[in-house]
Image (cartoon, coloured by chain):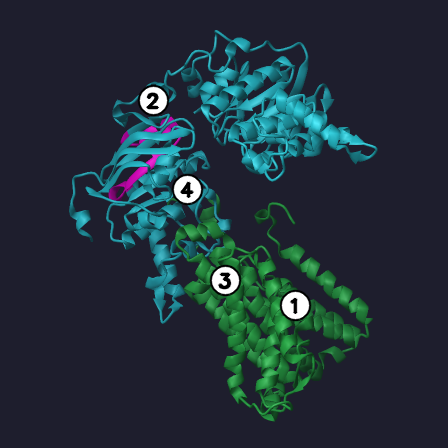
Chain colours: A green, B cyan
Amino acid sequence: MATMNGRSASLGRRLPAPVAMVGTWSRRTGILAQVLTLAIIVAGFALGTRGKYLSWANIQTILSLAAIPAILAIGLHLTVVLGGIDLSVQGVASLVAIFVGLLMKNQYNSHDVGLWIIPIALGIGGAAGLVNGVLNTRLRIPSFIATLGMSWVLYGMAVYINRAVNIQILDERIFKAINGMVLGIPNIAILALIVAIIMQFIQDRTQFGRYLYAIGGDEAVAQQGGVKVEKIKILVFTIAGIVYGLGAALLACRLGVATSRMGNSLLFPTITAVAVGGVALTGGLGGAKNAALGALIVTALNDGMVLMHVNPYAQQAVNGVVLIIAVALTLDRKKLGFIK
Amino acid sequence: MSDANNRRGGPVLALRQITKEFPGVVALDKVNLTIGRNELIGLVGENGAGKSVLMKIMIGLIPPDGGTISLHGQPVTLRSPGDAIRNGIGMVFQEGSLVPNLSVMENLFLCHEAGFRRLGILSLRSMRAAARELLAQLKLGIDVDLPVAEISPAERQMVEIARLLWLTKLYGHDNPVLILDEPTTVLADKERETLFTILREIKSRASIVLISHRLQEILENCDRIVVLKDGKNVTEMASSDARLQKIEQLMVGHSFSTDRFHEDEQRRRGEKEILRVENLGKAGQFQPLSFSVGEGEIVGLVGLVGSGKEEVCKCLAGLEKADSGSIFLDGKRLPAGSPRGSVRAGIGHIPIDRRSEGLALMMNVAENVNLLVLNRLKAGGFLSPGREKKNARHWVEECQIKTPSISTLCANLSGGNQQKTVISKWLSSRVRLLILDHPTRGVDVGAKDEIYKLMRKLAREGIGMLVMCDTLEEDIGLANRMLIMKDGRLVQEIGSAPKTKPDPKDIISLIV
């Protein structure tokens, strides 16, 4: 066998198929560091709260609180893998919430679309994402500006429609379904898990997923190889928007109340979850499971700080530090020329 | 298999009378190249001879201005690299065209996964099997699941070659044309042998065009050698008839016009030593070396890309940090790896890519000229517009920068005038040593002459210069002395006094 050098001779060994598969699965989207981080956090708070943290009730709380941030992070992380970012999550969530409030059974009008709210919410989110994608590719506006602008446009629309009143959602069935549990596990957490599995599968096993990583890895090479870069980018932003639509509809139904302010504090925890999960802001690395796990870590951390009665302002500062550390650890500095 | 492939005997690919012009230069002038079945062709020429332009035309990256390309006797128009692949022509680029975060297997089939797809889902098992088979054909044992970022440059090349072979076969070509752009520059000796073993094997089912600066390997491995010079075919010959010296002579040519480089203005090295480098070394880049540059002396640093000359210059400019040795400027030791330290000591660096590194294009001429000397242009703690104008006007006149006014944006100047602006920026900062990295690249003949004159003038003012040129002729013409580098070593020092300039043939045999 003509090996190119000594190094490849040792690497050239064929691994057994299952090992090789785990190898591939963890390489680009490794989760070892995240699982360890989670274990350390859990162990620390378990000691700090003398076991209260590990009570089943608290674990249920963490799972149900992590579900919606996880879904939003799964949407947002796609745009980060691409090498861009999507900051429109707050605007999309606010606008979707208003539509959810006004179209489901509520105290203001006689609409009651029932489960049809799902395609409507996904559609609004998708349309917003499509606009983000078109602004980014056709008008060549950097994604962080295009989506930040869009966020304010959508938020403005939501406030205009809603005038900042709280809309009570009166659909008991949906409220119960979302806040219910199966075998002691919150339904909403199961839903988040399903979203993560589907998205991870798409990333691992479809051409779309492959091209997503190719663009994130080296856009010029991907383009030269024949990847339809523009089309994939628009699709990515659209899917991200659809996922936000789902997350926002779930959030409104879970709270039982919709308002244009609903999205206002979603961006920071979502980006933190993406970064903590190990999705590199330089693109090309990290998958849906990283985003979901990142949301779980951030939620577990905040839940623990509440149980330990940490000063709320200090909690915010801790989150800020966590974000900066996570980005510092995942950034591929070789790809960056100058940091601006 | 398509009809075209059945027509055996004739050339696979024929380029006739290919012409390509860029503003100010004729890159290719009626160049012909025919490629037969199962042939390994070596394409040689100096930097700037037109090899890469010709390759880019062959893969549809740039359109020719004139001439025809025919494939199996049929004229074709290649609009993109993808188009070329569908026609059975592929290229392995020097900088590589693999996505680093994807695995070997994913890169092999990128954008052509359709055959592994069922109901929209990719079968990783069949992809892995196909990838292994493909690499086994080339007798390679690379783990197909490794990300490309983790395999060696040699392996990356192999993966690219395998990808091209697979792709062209996918499009039904049984004798594709593979173009390899200087594949051996990044390889160690042993890897180079492996590459040629594999290329000779592939030759039974493909035609290969090999670009290389290493003439010896071309002579040993190629069937035919095509020599380009200044965008023209010089000659082509069977390798069996070729001799190294003959090719060297053809590559360099004899077109020395009288005193293009203002050799009569060449001054002798002054008494004072400006730069002294002692045992400067950087692992993996260049071996410890020592040299000096005197007052008013122009020293040419000569060698191929990858010989380590760029890295030496980067260490002098403080852009990279050497592992060992020291640099002295006017007798004072420079801090290692500090661009600011180098600038303060009086080293100016004129980078090869002036548009991105040398000039702030969106600033005007005055702002660029004054950039390094803002301290001197202050009055009462604030920048004085009057002093700024005075300084800028002085240097625009001194360096004969042709600009409508000192407030014209540098983006709107010609290449030659941009270069003069970069030089004047350094002069205004009272530089002692100037490193010129391909100062005349991409400027037209007239501007070249002005830059040569400017360099002579700087020499008269006592500034020492270290220059890397586009062509060997330029190096010889400009320099007082040349330092020849090869494979990271300073191999020889050659004097280049006016009237007794060395013969380029003697030098080229030292560098390749």
State the CA–CA distance, disc 4 to disc 1. Answer: 42 Å
- What is the CA distance from the residue labelled 4 to the residue labelled 2? 24 Å
| Nearer to us: label 1 or label 3 | 3
Subunit of label 2: B
Disc 2 target residue: B247
Dot 3: within a 10 Å radius of its alpha carbon, few (fewer than 14), some, or many (20 or more) residues?
Answer: many
Callout 2, which amino acid? Answer: Ile
Q: Say if residue A12 shows up in the picture.
A: no
Mark found first going from the N terminus, 4 or 2: 4
Q: Which residue is label 4 attached to? A: B93
Q: Earlier in the sequence, mark 1 or mark 3?
A: 3
Which structural element holds mark 2?
helix
Between residues A76 and B327, which one lies in front from this camera angle? A76
Mark 4 or 3: in front is 3
Q: Chain of mark 1?
A: A
| Three-letter code, disc 4 | Phe
